Amino acid sequence: MKTTRVQTQSPNRSTGRRTRAGFTLVELLIAMLILAIGIMAILQMQFSSMGSAMISRDNSNASDIAKRIFDVMRAESGQWRGGTIANDVDTPAFNGTAFISSPVLAAVDGGGWTSWTRLFANPVDPRLTTTGTTRYCAYARGGYLEAGDVFTVQIAVVFPSANKAFPASNNAPPATQCPQYAAAKLDASMDPLDNNSLQMEGYKVQFFGSHIYRRGYL
């Protein structure tokens, strides 16, 4: 009796194994994890970029504010003909702003070089008004040079960091007043690591300086 042998053949002739299609659940989870890590890295870069842009904006605005204050002081110095600034300069040169006292130059002279004068009662915007993004407070001090013919001025522009706000009074929110106590901490703030500095409290400080000359001195 003749026996017939039936030979079976795998669907995949090259490997002899059945071809697998799709992904397993483990592979899918790993791919999703890698994708999530990539997205988180991109988001972190975006947040870092936004933070750097805010710091750059605040530093630029602080510089603009200091320049505007110096411009006001130089305009007022046109009245300084002899004696002291406090006696000669008696009319504000730049009305309609948020300056706490007028004239500005005389207020700084009254404070003397050993103390800081708060120029604004409330935070201002870069235009020195209270109608825009009011994040900036300014303090100043000055002293005489060259036998009283040159007045040197130092200005400190203070603004809060992202998670900080100016208090409504010396201790309480919301952000409606430039804190008077900040003036006592400005010298320490020249060293950001000083425990008594404003930087340690979450504020940023930029310092600027210039000279104001008596009319007819040069």
Image: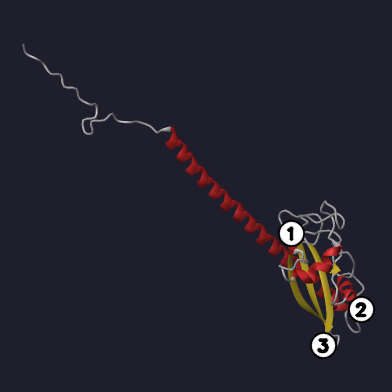
The residue drawn where x is 89% and y is 83% is 81
The answer to whether one can see residue 53 in this image is yes
Residue 88 marker: 2
Residue 191 marker: none
- Image colouring: secondary structure
Determine whether label 3 and label 1 are within 8 Å by CB: no
Which residue does the numbered mark 1 point to in the structure image?
202
Q: Position of residue 188 (x, y in %)?
A: 77, 70
Residue 146 marker: 3
- Relative placement, left or right, of 58 versus 88 is left
| Rendered-image quadrant of the C terminus | bottom right
Residue type, label 3: Glu
Q: Earlier in the sequence, mark 2 or mark 3?
A: 2
The residue drawn where x is 73% and y is 65% is 62
Pick the front one: 52 or 114: 114
- Relative placement, left or right, of 194 versus 167 is left
Q: How many marks can you see?
A: 3
Q: Quick one: which residue is furthest to the left in this view?
A: 1
Q: CA distance from mark 2 to mark 3?
A: 18 Å
Residue type, label 1: Gly
Q: Position of residue 79 (x, y in %)?
A: 88, 78
> Mark 3 falls on what kind of element?
loop
